[in-house]
Amino acid sequence: MLKYISSSDKKILLELFTERKAIYIYYFHEKYLFSPAQINRFIRNYLKEKIISFDDYKIKLTEYGIKWIVHNRRKIFLSHNKKEWKKIPNGWLVKINENINDLKLKNNYL
Amino acid sequence: MSEKINELPKSSNKMNPEDFIKLSDLLKIQTWLEDVCEALVELWNLCEYKNEQNLLFELLRRFLFLDYKMVNKNSESISKIICDKWKLESQSTIIVALCDDNKPDGSQYLIQILKSKFAYRYDWTEKNFLNNLSTVGQAPYHLKDGQNLILIDDFIGTGNTVERRIKWLRSKIEKINKPDIKIFLVSLACMQDALNVIKSLNIKFFTPKILKKGISDYYKGKILKNNIHNMKNLESKLHPMYKNLHLSNFNFGYGKAESLFAIEGLNVSNNVFPIFWWPLLIEERERNTILKRIR
């Protein structure tokens, strides 16, 4: 069972899902600069799950793979690894030497 | 699906389709290279000619890389040889790592893994295992008449280290006048050429893997000559000195062993071709290597 879908996996899955045809592995290197290791790991993991077929250096989604993507579309395409919402905007940060009371004076709305 | 693993890095440069496919083929056979793909590409690009790349492909294709699972499995077979084939009993047997100084090495890694394989054999205890050859004899029960001493090492390249340490041990046994002590030897892997050295020591030996020389034992005639030339050409791109080590002592691996062997996470043996681990290029530039060795 797949424990984690990497960002390169997601891009390859999206390409395979939209194109619905066998894609030559070099295409992913040429377009996204994915390394042979990234592509090799993708092939190994997704072949094992029968999500893709691999023949003559070309990858294609299986029938099951198409259904699997539809079923897991939120996890694959809507989840972001970088939790942007967790980042604190620069203006909201207090410098270590700054007095919290001085900050109150600066920000009238507090 | 949320568990995060280390994401592999992208390529820093675009490769041509032929190289990309060739490296993909190699990664399919040797999946451990995935984690060092950047170093692999760097190694690939170090080659001036296709013949050099073809040689590296062949050497890496045949490379024996033991991951933890394989070490574990081989340790299991070593324990079976000791107990079921050699029929050595716990009361009269001590298993000793071949390490003889204060520097940690692969023999200590192996003895730590091997120890657990004896857990279900009731009579064996921690007392049966020593992590340093120099400690043999410190307790009176180590060297008594009828004792069996099993020396273990992770890898035997030329056999010279083993020979030296067994001679030292024998002289120690002679000094205390206990002729009835038997010495055995086991290792995870051993070069075929070292077998003669071990045979001359007249001891029982077991290894699950016997390895041939990476170039000399695989090619003949003109192809052999060409591949020796290819490797010499590749090694000429390495700096002749690194931290007071002379590359000339390690050409084709220490003792010209031509080894193609490594254990996951351990310092690679100096018997391995230096092109896979020597960290400095001729122009005094550090290089990213697929295998690591600390000096």
Image (cartoon, rainbow, N blue to C red):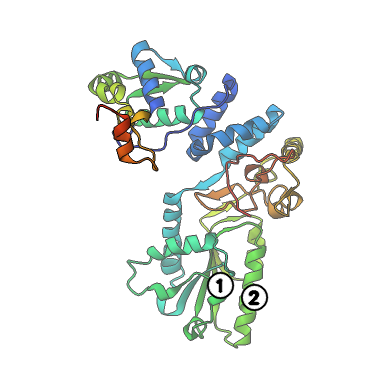
Q: Which mark is residue B133?
A: 1
What secondary structure is marked by label 1?
A: helix
Q: Horizontally, is B272 left or right of A38 in the view?
A: right
Query: Which residue shows up at 48% across the image and 60% down it?
Result: B109
Whether pointer 1 and pointer 2 mark residues with C-beta atoms closer than 8 Å, the reply is yes
Q: Horizontally, is B178 left or right of B77 in the view?
A: right
The C terminus of chain A lies in which quarter of the figure? top left
- The answer to whether B158 is drawn above or below residue B215 in the figure is below
Q: Residues within 10 Å of mark 2 (few under 14, many from 20)?
A: some
Q: Position of residue B69 (x, y in %)?
A: 42, 50
Q: Earlier in the sequence, mark 1 or mark 2?
A: 1
What secondary structure is marked by label 2?
A: helix
Q: Which mark is residue B168?
A: 2
Q: Nearer the viewer, residue A89 or B117?
A: A89
Q: Nearer the viewer, residue B267 or B88?
A: B267
Q: Amino acid at mark 1?
A: Leu
Q: Position of residue B182 (x, y in %)?
A: 54, 77
The N terminus of chain A lies in which quarter of the figure? top left
Q: Quadrant of residue B193?
A: bottom right
- The answer to whether B200 is drawn above or below residue B208 in the figure is below
Q: Amino acid at mark 2?
A: Trp
Label 1 to label 2: alpha-carbon separation:
10 Å
Q: Chain of mark 1?
A: B
* Residue B87 shows up from this direction: yes
Q: Nearer the viewer, residue B177 or A102?
A: A102
